[in-house]
Image (cartoon, rainbow, N blue to C red):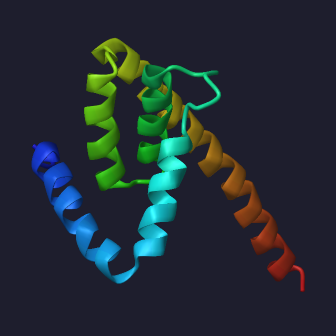
Amino acid sequence: MFENWKELLGTLRQSSGKLGNTNPKVLDAYRGLNAALGTNGALDAKTRELIALAVAVTTRCDGCISSHAAAAVKAGATEAEVSDALGTAIALNAGAAYVYSLHAMEAFQQNASA
């Protein structure tokens, strides 16, 4: 097992109070951002959590993975839906690596010709 995801989520929730005590405006703003999600009604909670889980993978955020995996379960996502969302994240990361490889080649070529 890579991680105890339920334990990590509990630790994150307990630790967030520490930051909130020293920087309450940031924590309030973060909570406000999360509270605003879905208020226009265009996406249901399950779809938002599937997107969030895929983004969590692409940003390599274990805390985000823990949080959004739990929220996806709560929103009724199936393992097949999660697998499809993660497949999209994998494909996007490959695409991003390709595009940034082109940037790296261009940077190399510009430096080599100088």
Percent coordinates x, y for residue 95 in the rendering: 63, 40
Percent coordinates x, y for residue 74 in the rendering: 27, 24
Relative placement, left or right, of 103 versus 13 is right
What residue is drawn where x is 45% and y is 63%?
28
What residue is drawn where x is 48% and y is 47%?
34
Q: Nearer the viewer, residue 72 or 98?
A: 72
What residue is drawn where x is 42% and y is 66%?
27
| Image quarter hosting the C terminus | bottom right
Q: Nearer the viewer, residue 41 or 10?
A: 41
Percent coordinates x, y for residue 9 in the rendering: 20, 50
Percent coordinates x, y for residue 63 in the rendering: 30, 54
Relative placement, left or right, of 48 versus 11 is right
Q: Residue furthest bottom?
A: 114
Q: Residue furthest right?
A: 114
Count of labels shown? 0
In which quadrant of the rendered view does residue 86 lie?
A: top left
Q: Nearer the viewer, residue 30 or 2?
A: 30
Residue 81 higher or lower than 1, as above or below: above
Residue 47 higher or lower than 53, as above or below: above
Q: Nearer the viewer, residue 109 or 27?
A: 27
Residue 7 higher or lower than 84, as above or below: below
What residue is drawn where x is 60% and y is 50%?
97
In which quadrant of the rendered view does residue 20 lie?
A: bottom left
Relative placement, left or right, of 29 versus 63 is right
Residue 49 higher or lower than 99, as above or below: above
| Image quarter hosting the N terminus | top left
In which quadrant of the rendered view does residue 46 lie?
A: top left
